[in-house]
Image (tube, rainbow, N blue to C red):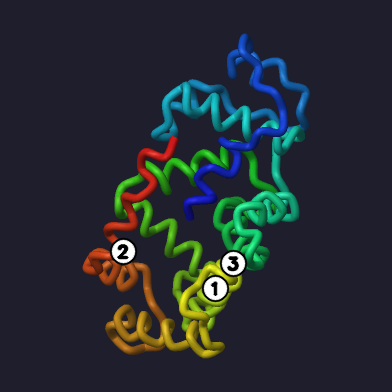
Amino acid sequence: MGALMVIFSLQPKQRRKTTDSVEDELELSTVRHRPEGLEQLEAQTRFSRKELQILYRGFKNECPSGVVNEDTFKDIYAQFFPQGDASTYAHFLFNAFDTDHNGSVSFEDFVMGLSILLRGSIQEKLNWAFNLYDINKDGYITKEEMLDIMKAIYDMMGKCTYPVLREETPRQHVEIFFQKMDKNKDGVVTIDEFIDCCQNDENIMRSMHLFENVL
């Protein structure tokens, strides 16, 4: 998810303001959606004031209205994966950020999710990941849901995968994961099974710490 971490913080489209504080931006902005005050976001996330300023400038550059819809989110995300098709994975990712399911992601939604992904506890990160895989939000992950996510990831990576993947590779990987996670063999993975399996996988645990200092 490295691209996600820098989507809005590294966009160069507009020149940066050197004198305006983010508080000025929050108070004087005429955008359609006004974010919470900086102090409140600082208290609710694990970001410092400076980090929130960087994220807010990038977010506002890309989304002057104060919210991002799914099409815009897909367009931004696609910039980081030009060799593949990131649209399906971006759709799933957008739904995970859109916690109130209103079809848009506000700055608050964005930084709250990003705070978990970058600075959250292992438990918080795994809860967030489970929510991503639980496409229909019924509290379980099915093989079909995991396969949809896996295919979306391979589509996004495109020609970057080596060796070139056979068509059946995503399904084979899902079968392996599911055998590990579905402890009671009832055909679905619960959040407890998901977390228990991930916590006992060294590779997954190592990946949880990759982006902690990205900002």
Numbered tag placed on residue 204 in the rendering:
2
* Residue 54 sits above or below residue 83 on the image: above
- C-alpha separation, residue under disc 3 versus residue under disc 2: 20 Å
**Which residue is rendered at x = 68% and y = 51% of the image?**
73
**Which residue is rendered at x = 69% and y = 48% of the image?**
104
Amino acid residing under circle 1: Tyr
**Which residue is rendered at x = 31% and y = 73% of the image?**
193
Amino acid residing under circle 3: Met
Q: Secondary structure at mark 3?
A: helix
Percent across and percent down for residue 101 are 64, 55
**Which residue is rendered at x = 31% and y = 50% of the image?**
209
Q: Secondary structure at mark 1?
A: helix
Amino acid residing under circle 2: Ile
Left or right placement of residue 58 versus residue 126 in this view: right
Packing grade of label 1 (10 A; few <14, some 14-19, many >=20) is some
Q: Are marks 3 and 1 in contact (CB under 8 Å)?
A: yes
Observer-side mark, 1 or 2, equals: 1
Q: Quadrant of residue 7?
A: top right
Observer-side mark, 3 or 2, equals: 3
Numbered tag placed on residue 154 in the rendering:
1
